[in-house]
Amino acid sequence: MASTTRDNRADGVEFIYEDDGRITARDLETGVASYGETKAEALVMLAEALSLHTGEGEPVTDETLREFGLNPENTGDESLPEFMQ
């Protein structure tokens, strides 16, 4: 079971300590989240996710996915994390 560090604020970052040892950092204002092996890594990944969320960067296309060896038709069958349900 994951645990969080939340103090009922509407801004800031919530850290969720996953059972597998990863740490999820979630921006409370936007709900955008990312994870890492450490808090620092999770925050770096969250900063990148927030940049993309606000329109910075370039959109991912099917061609981009293929360049990375990914199949754009494979959407995965994993369930959403608890905080996204």
Image (tube, grey):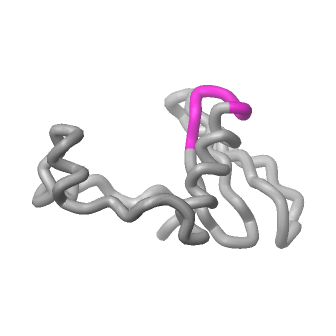
Judge whether residue 1 can be spotted in this image. no
Q: Quadrant of residue 70?
A: top left
Q: Residue at x 50, y 30 (%)?
A: 20
Left or right of residue 26: residue 72: left
Magenta segment: does it hold 36?
Answer: yes
Magenta segment: does it hold 45?
Answer: no
Q: Residue at x 66, y 40 (%)?
A: 44
Q: Quadrant of residue 13?
A: bottom right
Residues drawn in magenta = 35-40
Q: Residue at x 68, y 44 (%)?
A: 3
Judge whether residue 6 can be spotted in this image. yes
Q: Residue 37: x, y in percent?
A: 59, 27
Left or right of residue 71: residue 43: right
Question: Eyeballing the image, is 42 above or below 34?
Answer: above
Left or right of residue 21: residue 47: right
Q: Residue 76: x, y in percent?
A: 21, 54
Q: Residue at x 63, y 68 (%)?
A: 31
Q: Residue 74: x, y in percent?
A: 14, 55
